[in-house]
Amino acid sequence: MGYTVSSSEKRLDEMVSIAALIYRSPGYADSLWRSLVETVPGLGRSIEFFFLANNATDQLLEHLQAKKYPHRVRREPIGRIPAEIQPLPYMIDVYRGWNEAIRHAAGKLVVLLNSDHVFTAHWLDSLLAVWKEDIAVSPLMVEPGPEHFRDSVNGTGSLICDCGHHPSTFDRARFERFAESATKDALTDGGVFMPVLISRAALLKVGLYPEGNIRSTDACGCPGDQVLFGRLQSIGVRHVTCHRAICYHFMEGEMREGH
């Protein structure tokens, strides 16, 4: 499915909010902030950004404060787990964190992303150029492999190009060359669940993310992000990937770091 890209100056009037969960890594905080400053000209003005420090370590909180990065702090024990939720504390903490970020976002549109992402120039302009009320739009993801987000998961899978598994080893030049070769004027169905640009009202209408993975016969349950996007589909919001916006994903960044 093709589309026509609007002029980058044709911006939406409403504020856009970008939110990223983080819980322990100063290095990933610095990497993400640097990438956003380099690729989002309106950051801090027409574009809101904040880290959601999600039951974060004291070391990370001190770093966010020292760097004066915009952030909100969530400190909440797991507590009661609803009967329909698979009892996986880490996943519960993550989904509750995302819901808090969405509730506090000031923008009509919300961009949810992870701390282990890096972006190409104009990625957000490209998403805004194609966004409509009835879609949620993700950039095309590049991952180092060999494991990656496959087409079979949700329609459009990630591409593989090993540009590093950590900001300290990131080969930016290689990523930019690969991204240039992969960029095209196309929208395809589905895609990665994050990053995503979506109407905040639509998220609130479907009740946000479930509080964790939903119980099933699988030991990990049904992923909460799949449940959310299914709910969005039920109200007429379909998920697509924009191939003019490219994102790199280090994969399990904060979880992998130090192991």
Image (cartoon, rainbow, N blue to C red):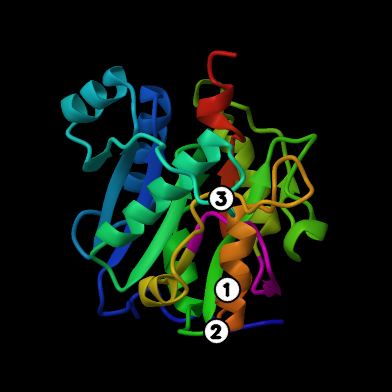
Badge count: 3
Residue 244, can we see it?
no
Relative vertical location of residue 104 with respect to residue 259 in this rendering, above or below: below
Could you classify mark 3 by the number of other residues whose Cα lies within 10 Å: few (under 14), some (14-19), or many (20 or more)? Answer: many
In whole angstroms, how far apart are the C-alphas of marks 1 and 3? 25 Å
Residue 133 counted in the magenta span: no
Using the image, tell me which numbered label, if any, was put on residue 231. Answer: 1
Which structural element holds mark 3? strand
Residue 195 counted in the magenta span: yes
Using the image, tell me which numbered label, if any, was put on residue 25. Answer: none
Residue under label 2: 235
Of residue 136 and residue 94, the one placed in the foreground of this image is 94
Residue 132 spot, x, y in % from top left: 47, 83
Which secondary structure is most common in the magenta stretch? loop
Task: Tell me the amino acid under the disc marked 1.
Answer: Arg
In whole angstroms, how far apart are the C-alphas of marks 2 and 3? 28 Å
Residue 189 spot, x, y in % from top left: 70, 73
Task: Tell me the amino acid under the disc marked 3.
Answer: Cys
Could you classify mark 1 by the number of other residues whose Cα lies within 10 Å: few (under 14), some (14-19), or many (20 or more)? Answer: many
Could you classify mark 2 by the number of other residues whose Cα lies within 10 Å: few (under 14), some (14-19), or many (20 or more)? Answer: few
Image-based side of 247 in relation to 144, left or right: left
